[in-house]
Image (cartoon, helix red, strand yellow):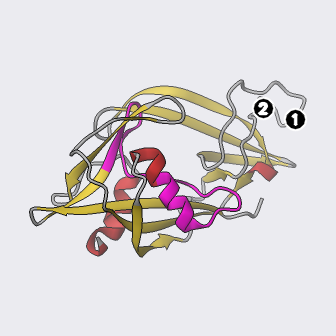
Amino acid sequence: MDEVVQKVTAFIVRERGRVKELLVFKHPTAGIQIPAGTVEKGEDIETAVKREAYEETGLQFVEIEDYLGCFENELECNQRIIAETTQVYIEPNLKAIPYKRKLPKGLTVGYHSTQEDFTHISYIEYEYDQFYEPICIDANITGWVPNENLSAQKKRHFFLLTTQEETADAWELKSDQGHIFKPYWTPLSPKPQIIPPQDKWLDFVYERI
């Protein structure tokens, strides 16, 4: 599939006592992150970044202050991205046994080889500690995915956002998948410790926020 999968990232910033702060959140199994996600079909990137900000922080009123740039393609040569939610099969055949778990659109996977209409991929899901060190493996999937459900192009857009909502310094909310997210404000200096590869996002926009 030649479709470019579009991603958005929300750098939500406030100033308190002359100190600039960034809004991050702690995922219960995936470490400390910046709000980000996949642009849905028919959605523009501005709408997408506001939606992701709401879904991962609970903020209903955010404003886009600036477009900070993009990575034209975030994927390495040994990576692919799921372009449509897909089954993973144990053999390159739609009649082969599929894994019970589907891989959702927007997920980055390892690329191994292509055989006619199928691509051999792998996906490892780690559980992280409070900051960024993986402590165990939650899922390890290797199999075959129809070529039409994959893309070799992942474009990531970065936005600077602000909010007029008064919030606590830290709070909790329940995600649509039942996880408890814990957003909190953290000073921009020194640079917050967040999970890879998101630490590279912060490096990219640091002087602009």
How far across and how far down the image is residue 101, in percent? Answer: 67, 28
Q: Is residue 1 visible?
A: yes
The amino acid type of the residue labelled 1 equals Asn
Q: Position of residue 45 (x, y in %)?
A: 57, 66
Residue 139 x, y percent position in the rendering: 55, 27
Q: Residues within 10 Å of mark 2 (few under 14, many from 20)?
A: many
Question: In this figure, which residue is indicated by the disc labeled 1?
Answer: 93
Contact, mark 2 vs mark 1 (Cβ under 8 Å):
yes
Q: Which quadrant of the structure image shows residue 206?
A: bottom left
Query: What residue sits 51% from the left and 34% below the top?
Result: 125
Tell me what residue is drawn at x 48 percent, y 46 percent.
55
Residue 77 found in image quarter: bottom right
- Residue that sits furthest to the right in the current view: 95
Q: Amino acid at mark 2?
A: Tyr
- Magenta span: 24-52
Tell me the SS state at disc 2: loop
Give me the C-alpha separation between circle 2 and circle 1: 7 Å
Q: Residues within 10 Å of mark 1 (few under 14, many from 20)?
A: some
Please tell me whether residue 190 is drawn above or below residue 121 in the rendered image. Answer: below
